[in-house]
Image (tube, rainbow, N blue to C red):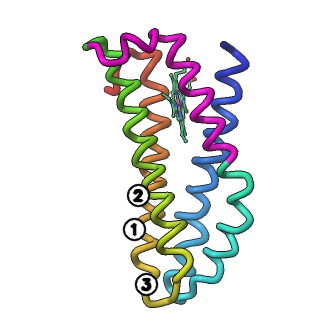
Amino acid sequence: MRILLFLHLIGASIWLGGHLILALKILPPAWRARDPAPIRAFEERYEALGLPALLLQVITGIWLATLWLPANAWLSDNPLASLIRLKLGLLALTLMLGAHARLRLIPRLSGANLGGLAVHIYAITLTALALAWVGVSFRFGGVL
Ligand code: HEM
């Protein structure tokens, strides 16, 4: 349990930390200059660390969730089941935003269509913050 949580927090640091750096430090100057090159350069270097980190989150997260509540109760009205469903919903949103950005937006990125990618970067960063908030909520029994 402790090692799983440790690995989950390492993965969260990489995923959330990387996206905060992208959203707060790489994107704003690139947006002002209408220059996609720094974003593309960051994505290319970050991907090799970010994608394994996300995979680690899925494996450790689902494992931790089964320790909190057996999988056959995940559709029940237990408050922990709601947190698990919320986590899985936010994960699905992350995967959709990431796949759309990676497969559709990044290959034809230019100064003119940087706005669409900026929206995706903010959305995926906010989703990562929400995943961390919902994660912390397990020990408090609810999101508020
Ligand atoms: C990038 C994605 C994710 C991030 C950034 C993230 C982040 C976090 C954070 C910061 C915690 C708090 C740990 C603590 O309270 O000490 C947590 C806990 C947790 N997360 Fe995630 N998480 C992610 C994905 C997932 C996924 C896909 C699941 C699957 C259901 C999941 C399930 C859990 C569970 C069950 C806990 C409670 C662990 C415990 O305190 O025992 N997480 N997460």
- Dot placed on the residue nearer the N-terminal end, 3 or 2: 3
In percent of width and height, residue 41 lies at: 69, 74
* Residue at mark 2: C-beta within 8 A of ligand 1: no
Residue 39, placed above or below residue 71: below
Q: Amino acid at mark 3?
A: Asn
Q: Secondary structure at mark 3?
A: loop
**Residue at 61 percent of width and 47 percent of height:** 15
Report the Cα–Cα distance between label 3 and label 2.
Answer: 16 Å
Of the numbered discs in the image, which one, if any, rests on residue 99? none
Of the numbered discs in the image, which one, if any, rests on residue 123? 2
Residue 109, placed above or below residue 8: below
Q: Which residues are magenta?
A: 52-76
Camera-side residue of 51 and 32: 51
Asked whether residue 58 is drawn in magenta, I would say yes
Residue 98, placed above or below residue 65: below
Of the numbered discs in the image, which one, if any, rests on residue 113? 3
